[in-house]
Image: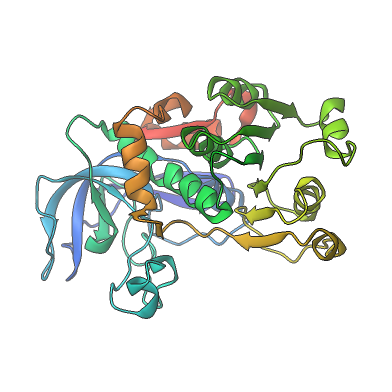
Amino acid sequence: MKAAIYRGIGRIGLQEVERLPPPPGYVTIDTRQTGICGSDLHVYWGHWPQPGALALGHETSGVVVEAGEGVTGVEPGDRVAIECFSHCGLCRYCRSGHYNHCRQRQWVSQDTHGGFAEFTTAHASSLFRLPAGMSFEQGALVEPLAVGCRALGQAGATWRDRVAILGGGTIGQFCLAAAKAANVRETWITVKYPQQARMARDLGADHVFVLGDPDLDDWASGPARAPRPDAVIETVGGGGNFDLALRIVRPRGVVVLLAGYPEPVEVDLGRVLESEAVVTGSHCYASTGLDTDFGAAIDLMATGRVDATRLVTHRFPLESVEEAFRVAADKSSGSIKVHLCQ
């Protein structure tokens, strides 16, 4: 089968690889659509290690074509979306719904090919059936929307709350979409590119601040009596954004760290002491409340409360993976979410 393999910094291309039968507990999926995630771009740019001769890709949907030994709950012909990791279902974290911390967790593409290949191998525990009528494009957007649902749940935000989102990339936009679906009281979002600003307004953001806009500075340093966010979701990374989150959140509010922090950062922790803000992380997805975050994301799309497909700005066949990554990596192209379609 064909698979897209990293070939060094800023390089990726197709090569023929052996298609192996699924190991016990795993299934083989005929890949239909896969999104290029920010984490995939970090690997492309050389910020994170490249995985050798394995195809990455975890924002994936497709059709089960083969089930390995011991697989139950799914069968060939099922249309599925894929979580980016497996879990055992038996440990204390799995039993309490926090299966994103399973000690036997294994990532998609850890030992097998992911969604940037014609066939994806995934553990049965990571699969969610798609409802009838849900497209494969929607299926490939379940994963990033679930990340947004998880972050909103970690913030504990309800209809009473004001929510600010730092960063207008795919994850920031899906945090906004989840907040709007939850009917929160008011939303702010910071963006860097014009297409991100347009998308945020289309999704219903109450306030959109473009980096470098004086209005952003005024908001961030406004009078103490001004309404402040009850929750801030930080999706960009870096000490400056962490500090901004701590500066704007209301006293006793919540800051949710959703960005990757690959290196230590300097942060003014005195703000935490003074404001008594709660700082927490949001790691992928698991169960929030009575539902899994994946289940919540599927429901939001299936019921029409979130039109996730509007974030897909570019679509390429797998054969054009080099161009797809070039467009995804260059935001001057107008890209937000780039998909590979098969």
Q: Nearer the viewer, residue 79 or 229?
A: 229
* Residue located 67% across and 33% down the image: 188
Q: x, y percentage for residue 257?
A: 64, 56
Q: x, y percentage for residue 116?
A: 36, 46
Q: x, y percentage for residue 14?
A: 37, 44
Rendered image quadrant of residue 72: bottom left
Asked whether, in this view, residue 217 is left or right of residue 73, the answer is: right
Q: x, y percentage for residue 149?
A: 46, 46
Asked whether, in this view, residue 31 is left or right of residue 256, the answer is: left
Q: Nearer the viewer, residue 61 or 133?
A: 133
Rendered image quadrant of residue 303: top left
* Residue located 67% across and 34% down the image: 189
* Residue located 63% across and 47% down the image: 235
- Looking at the rendered structure, the number of numbered marks drawn on it comes to 0
Decide: is 181 above or below 8: above
Q: Can residue 95 be seen in this snapshot?
A: yes
Q: Can residue 115 be seen in this snapshot?
A: no
Rendered image quadrant of residue 140: top left
Asked whether, in this view, residue 221 is left or right of residue 300, the answer is: right
Q: Nearer the viewer, residue 251 or 237?
A: 251
* Residue located 90% across and 37% down the image: 223
Colour mode? rainbow
Q: Which quarter shows the C terminus?
A: top left
